[in-house]
Image (cartoon, rainbow, N blue to C red):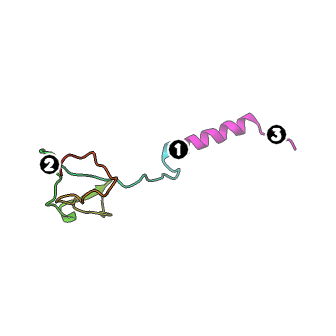
Amino acid sequence: MVFNISKSKILLGTIAFAALVASGLVAQTQGPPVLIRLWRSAGQPVTDMTAGDFKIVDQGKPQAIFAFHRPAVGPAAPLAQLEHSNRAGA
């Protein structure tokens, strides 16, 4: 089976596709959500804020916060036998 496609049809198709891409009509995929960690200037995590303290806007539209949690404060769990850590401290 032989297909006879003229060069002008190929060129026209390529130009049409390029126009769609340039116009933004081709479906866009969203990346993964952004994870933001807040640290104080002394290197300690910010622990006294809630999700209500933030307002997120994307292209002028308010966005909901998908997940929010405060970092754990306090001593870390003790290491089990044969576990090692690269963190300083007890």
For disc 2, the neighbor class at 10 Å (few under 14, some 14 to 19, many from 20) is few
Foreground label between 2 and 1: 2
Q: Amino acid at mark 3?
A: Asn
Report which residue position mark 1 lands on: 21
User: Quadrant location of residue 50?
Assistant: bottom left
**Which segment is the magenta one?**
1-19
* Residue 59, image x, y percentages: 33, 53
Label at residue 40? 2
> Residue lying farthest left?
42
Name above or below for residue 42 compared with residue 60: above
Q: Tell whether position 4 is magenta.
A: yes
Left or right side of 44 for 9: right
Dot 2 or dot 3: first in sequence order is 3
Tag 1, which secondary structure? Answer: helix
Lower sequence index among marks 2 and 1: 1
Is disc 3 placed on a helix, strand or loop?
loop
Q: Identify which residue is drawn at 48% across, 51% down.
A: 28
Mark 2 or 3: in front is 2
Instruction: Tell me the kind of residue under disc 1.
Output: Val
Instruction: Compare residues 84 and 37 and report the one nearer the observer.
Output: 84
Tag 2–tag 1 contact (CB < 8 Å) = no
Q: Label 2 amino acid?
A: Arg
Please give the residue where the numbered disc 3 appears in the rendered image.
4
**Label 2–label 3 contact, CB within 8 A:** no
